[in-house]
Amino acid sequence: MVAQNIFFGILAAIVAISALRMVTTRNIVHAALYLVAVLAGLGALYVLLTAEFVATTQVLVYIGAVMVLFLFGIMLTKAPLGNVMEMTGRQWPLAAVVAALLGGVTIYSLVDRFGSERLNTDGPIYRTADVSDEVFSTYIVPFEAVSVLLLAALIGAIVLARKD
Amino acid sequence: MATQSVLAFVGPSVNWWALLPQMILLGAALLIMLVSALAPKQTSTPFVTVTTMCAAITSYIVATGLWNDVQRDGPSSSIASAFGIDGFSIFFTMLILVALAATALLSHGYLDKEGIDAPEFHALLLCSAAGAIVMASANDLVVMFIGLEALSIGLYVMIAMHDRRQEARESAIKYFVLGAFSSAFLLYGIALTYGATGSTNLIHIRDYLGAVVFRDQHLLMAAMALLLVGLSFKVAAAPFHFWAPDVYQGAPSPVTGWMASVAKAAGFAALLRIFFAAFASHRIDWTPIVSVLAAVTLVVGAVMAILQNDVKRMLAFSSVSHAGYVLIAVQAATDQGTAAALFYLFTYTFMVLGTFAVVGAMGRDDDHPLANYAGLGRSRPVLAIGFTILLLAQAGIPTTSGFVAKFQVIAAAVNNKNYVLAGLAMITAVVGAFMYLRIVMAMYVDNEEQKSSVPSWHWSTKVVVIAMVGFTLLAGLVPQFLIEFAEDAVPILIRG
């Protein structure tokens, strides 16, 4: 347990510092890369919680797909790169209040509900193999039907975007 | 340990035969895309239409075989109970396939006339149809949601396909934004249902709700409300109908017909399967909400339709009021009511497809003022007679299927002792009839100033209108076969 606690401390510090730097940096690309650090740190925390499937999904979806979309968005919209003073909107105190409120409510509800209750560590551990068993048995129809949905979306996007 | 679990894994049994209808449709969609990619010169609109028609017909034949199997051996479900194979799902499969064939023909005429060379249109139509079938057959809320999204994505793109028409694009954006909005409601409802019952599987939900008495059922009530709101958007029930007039008006007429028939039918299929079949033990909670929704929808549909001057907007509000009639049958929450709803949806599909076929033939422009129809009775007598029959059927005049449908719905409400709603339905039917008669009058009476441009009668429109009028009269004169068909198609949730 000790090793896990040490690693949790390190990872939590990385996540917290990166999150702070993400909202304070004046460079939009740096902000995006700090967000990568935040999301990767969270992924590592999931591994510590033995939720390796969630961790992999976190890396694939957030770092792999969402961040690439962000960077493409920055590239294609010709957003000003480099240090830009106007990056921080004028409503940032309001945003800070909202963030503080949200954080306060989350912490309060967690403490209120669980207090010093200890997590039951003897329960079953669900591994990626169990998840995949579920996906290929109970949830096989949604899993397959999504491919139809994606195909339709793909065809549709190409049809609407091409010029001819 | 890991190797052991791999060896122990047994996949769910799959009833391929029951999946064949939608697999044929998807296969045809892939074939169209593949051929259009490999041999773009050879993929003309006729090839694509013929492929789509063949897929629809083959699929229909398979569905007929399935229907006979289900009537003989009883309903079942397949693939971890996520996919229902009962009379209900096959009934809707057949309805969707009929609409698919008609829409494919009408789109052929539309693409021809507009000079669009787009094999993707029919591929998306096929995907959309497969999504609708999945939605109507789903025994699992997640599957239902994915079916709904596949149906809708096809629709969004089909509406926006015409790149020279700003109105179509605008209408597609409107439908997309509101569709996504309503999907969010539905998804939230699914999440809360999962929270309240511990499963997304409708069979499990029904068993759980039948066995467990809640100390407080706020979560379940919120789930029901959100599911109802999400699906009401899809079927255009008031007060969630605001998108309908604008979107119906801006969309190409064949797509409007598809939206009015299949999107509505699939929405009601989901509504019946969730509320009538899965939430059966809690009907006392949801029937009052649905009856209020039905009453509001009837009044809004009938009154707003009278105030319109554009034929497509009139028909949009008429489709809102039709949703109200089906909701009357849904709120009865009996087998009789559900059979009435199914009968209504089946006959309505034919009426609305025929109606929008005529509207599509009437002009290429997005606005269809009533004045355009002046003198149509003289310049195009056959078209005018067909249109008249379809409009009278929508109004519910005897000898048409619309009369039988309305009669059954009202009978279901009366048997359920909901006399207020039955009375309201009769009054709004009279009010609504005024709107249909206004269009008929315009065609025959004021032919002083011959404003109507003589519409071009594409052969595909002819075929569709004649078929739809023929069925509307047939089901109005000898409705018994269709009544029995609908009675055999009441949804049954069964573990398989």
Image (cartoon, helix red, strand yellow):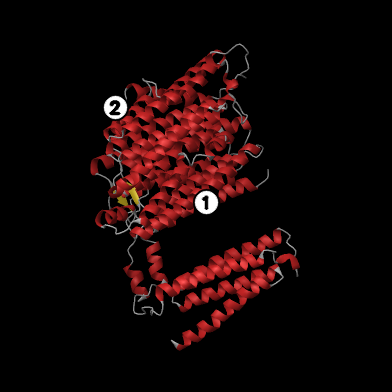
| Residue of label 2 | B480
Picture residue at 37% right of the left edge, 32% below the top: B344
**Taking A140 as reference, is B494 left or right?**
left
| Residue of label 1 | A151
**Taking B493 as reference, is A163 left or right?**
right
Instruction: Count all numbered tags in the image, as a single digit.
Output: 2
Picture residue at 41% right of the left edge, 49% below the top: B225
Instruction: Please say if B95 is above or below B359.
Output: below
**Residue B398, label in figure:** none
**Taking B47 as reference, is B15 left or right?**
left
Q: Inspect the image, locate mark 2, and give the three-letter code of the amino acid beneath it.
A: Gln
Q: Disc 1 and disc 2: Cα gap in Å?
A: 41 Å
Position of residue B111 measured from the top left corner of the image (x, y, whole percent): 59, 33
User: Which is more toward the observer, B355 or B468?
Assistant: B355
Q: Secondary structure at mark 2?
A: helix
Figure quadrant of residue A85: bottom right
Instruction: Please say if B134 is above or below A91.
Output: above
Position of residue A40 measured from the top left corner of the image (x, y, whole percent): 56, 74
